[in-house]
Image (spheres, rainbow, N blue to C red):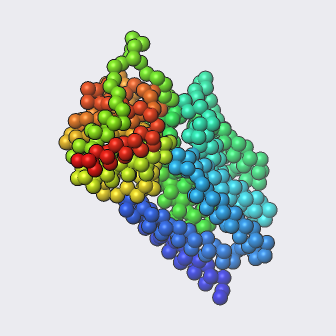
Amino acid sequence: MSDEDLINLINAAYVVAAVLFIWGMAQLRRPSTARRGNQYAAVGMAIAVGATLFNPGIDGGSAFIWIAAGILSGAIIGAFLARTVEMTQMPEMVAVFNGFGGLASALVAGAELIRLNDLDADIDLDIVITIALSTAIGALTLSGSIVAAAKLHGTMNTNPILIPARNIVSLVVAAAVLAFGVLLIVDPDATVWYIALAAAALLLGYLVAIPIGGADMPVLVALFNSYSGLAAAAAGFVIGNDVLIITGALVGASGLILTSIMTRAMNRSVTNVMFGGFGQSGADVTSGDGEQRPYRSVNADDAGVMLAYANSAVFVVGYGLAVAQAQHDLRALADIMTNKGCDVKYGIHPVAGRMPGHMNVLLAEADVPYDQLYDIEEINRELENAEIAVVIGANDVVNPQARSNPGSPIYGMPIIDVDKAANVIVMKRSMASGFSGIDNDLFYLDQTSMLFGDAKKSLKSLVTEVEDLVKNG
């Protein structure tokens, strides 16, 4: 078979892989088809990688050994992480993967630059421009994602880190990135400009990420996901790989769409997120005069009675559920209530948790029926008629201040209208505020009862109590 025929077959395989990628992403729109979509995309990636191995431009022997070593080591690490990483660590793992995607793109661009320089070939202008773009975006994504992962993991302060004149400093560094990029384009033979560009972009990524507080982490993760895709698409242009261009474009576009969804769900703009320095960590909250506002607390026995005799219930989940690893206990409680005839639903806010879709993944792990999952618009239509709403680990996304207090930083943010339910149970460890650092008016309403303690232990107690009450009539 001639090289031309082989390349045509490889490109045909790339088309099949691209179709599987697109179809797989389309299946991610619904929880019931998300697993299948992930499998389609995995098959597409296997086809793309396999087809690439037959590229006539790859010299046999040692090249195949290095490729095989990379595939094997990556598969082993991926399988290990998939089985060992806790659900609470999933957001930082996603952030790290975004960073590694950016790193890979920057290294591919650098390797191609070195290869072309070794050939003493004139590098086309479009190629050197994409090398500069892939390097800059990839390096920025790497450092920014590492900061995001460190904040999510708690190894770095989750509060916004506001250095003096941070916006001016960031603009200066951004100008340096642009200048080094131009110098690399003008003189691609001088690899020093590639190194300088990568270093400046790494610093810019760090400066972009450190002012972002914990409350804005879902937006930051989605944004860097988009950046990693853009870097990959640029790397695809650098080496002339169609499937890499398509894949990168898909990831970049989906990341931007997801970022838009996140910012709309917070009633914020991307600019406000990146430069606002909003999102403080929680602390005990008091009223303006320094006095603790009055609230009502209940024990598991009393809360169990409320749940056992409810005909309709809405569970609103947040990051606290993931921290406690209590999703299976919640499912057990919901099953008992469903079996006795209670209409059970789950409300999920787009920015609940620490990454986009975090709560959907968490509930899917517990095999919660897909038809019980409702997004914010759907569940808000149900809450006015709900006998009881149970908030587990969520805070800012159910805060009525978003509707009632024009002076609140979250004013205008769409929330789940838990306060419209007839009765509310809020499960928390304490009266501490959420990642935004804002007091939650929901806690002090007449129909609200606070159930303090670890969510897993509280849910286990509720399962026992409700089960006993249901059995005894």
Q: Position of residue 155 (x, y in %)?
A: 63, 36
Residue at the spot 50% in from the left edge and 54% down from the top edge: 252
Residue at 34% of width from left, 30% of height from top?
298
Instruction: Please indicate whether residue 199 sits to the left or right of residue 62 in the image.
Output: left
- Seen in the picture, residue 26 relative to 8 is either above or below; the reply is above
User: Would residue 25 be seen by someone viewing this image from the given angle?
Assistant: yes
Q: Is 351 situated left or right of 104 in this image? A: left
Q: Is residue 105 above or below residue 19?
A: above
Residue 353 is drawn in which quadrant? Answer: top left
| 345, above or below 403, in the image | below
Using the rendered image of the protein, determine whether residue 357 is visible from the camera's viewpoint.
Answer: no
Quadrant of image for the N terminus: bottom right
Q: Residue at x 53, y 62 (%)?
A: 247
From this viewpoint, which residue is outermost toward the bottom?
Answer: 1
Q: Residue furthest front?
A: 472
Q: Looking at the picture, how far across and down is residue 147, in whole percent?
A: 61, 40
- Residue beneath the point at 53% across and 71% down: 43
